[in-house]
Image (tube, grey):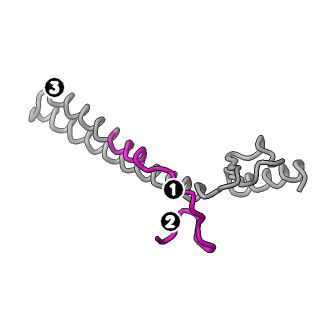
């Protein structure tokens, strides 16, 4: 497929479905037109990248719920006089530390080994074994 054809197809896909990811060997893959381009000979990390992105989104959602809940509790306790201003600030900063540590869990996850995935394995899943 010629670059101008790829550009047209990517524009159509983007209009219909939103952001577009493109996987190719790097030669003539129209990198300026896709939102994400993955190139190279070993594309084993693609499934891992999708899985990592999904987990990151889950962690962000959980962090938002936790942060909002912690703030509601701290504000209610502070307004009712159950805790001092200092304790409220410590509670707020403590929730920030918890949220940051949740995000750091993703840093422990390293790219999978270079072993090929089994045919028929869905993107975002890990092959057995």
Query: Residue 118 appears at what percent x and percent y?
Result: 59, 71
CA gap, disc 3 and disc 1:
47 Å
CA gap, disc 2 and disc 3:
48 Å
Q: In the displayed structure, would residue 105 be above or below residue 48?
A: above
- Check if residue 5 falls in the magenta segment: no
Answer left or right for 126 relative to 92: right
CA gap, disc 2 and disc 1:
9 Å
Most distant residue in the left direction: 82
Answer left or right for 59 relative to 15: left
Residue receiving disc 1: 112
Q: Overall secondary structure of the magenta stretch?
A: loop
Residue receiving disc 2: 126
Q: Quadrant of residue 12?
A: bottom right
Mark 3 is surrounded, within 10 Å at the Cα level, by few (under 14), some (14 to 19) or many (20 or more) other residues, namely some
- Callout 2–callout 1 Cβ contact below 8 Å: yes
Q: In the displayed structure, would residue 33 be above or below residue 41?
A: above
- Give the label, 3 or 1, closer to the camera: 1
Which label was assigned to residue 85?
A: 3
- Callout 2–callout 3 Cβ contact below 8 Å: no
Q: Earlier in the sequence, mark 2 or mark 1?
A: 1
Query: Residue 109 appears at what percent x and percent y?
Result: 43, 50
Residue located at (88% from left, 57% from top): 1
Q: Which region of the structure is painted magenta?
A: 101-129
Residue located at (18% from left, 31% from top): 88
Mark 2 is surrounded, within 10 Å at the Cα level, by few (under 14), some (14 to 19) or many (20 or more) other residues, namely some
């Amino acid at each position: 497929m010629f670059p101008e054809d790829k550009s047209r197809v990517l524009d159509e896909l983007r209009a219909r479905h939103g952001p577009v990811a493109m996987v190719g060997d790097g030669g003539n893959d129209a990198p300026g037109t896709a939102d994400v381009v993955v190139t190279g000979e070993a594309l084993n990390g693609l499934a891992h990248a999708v899985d990592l992105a999904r987990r990151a989104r889950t962690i962000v959602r959980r962090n938002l719920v936790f942060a909002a809940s912690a703030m509601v509790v701290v504000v209610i306790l502070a307004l009712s006089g159950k805790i001092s201003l200092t304790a409220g600030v410590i509670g707020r900063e403590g929730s920030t530390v918890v949220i940051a540590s949740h995000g750091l869990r993703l840093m422990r996850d390293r790219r999978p080994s270079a072993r090929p995935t089994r045919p028929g394995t869905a993107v975002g899943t890990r092959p057995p074994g």
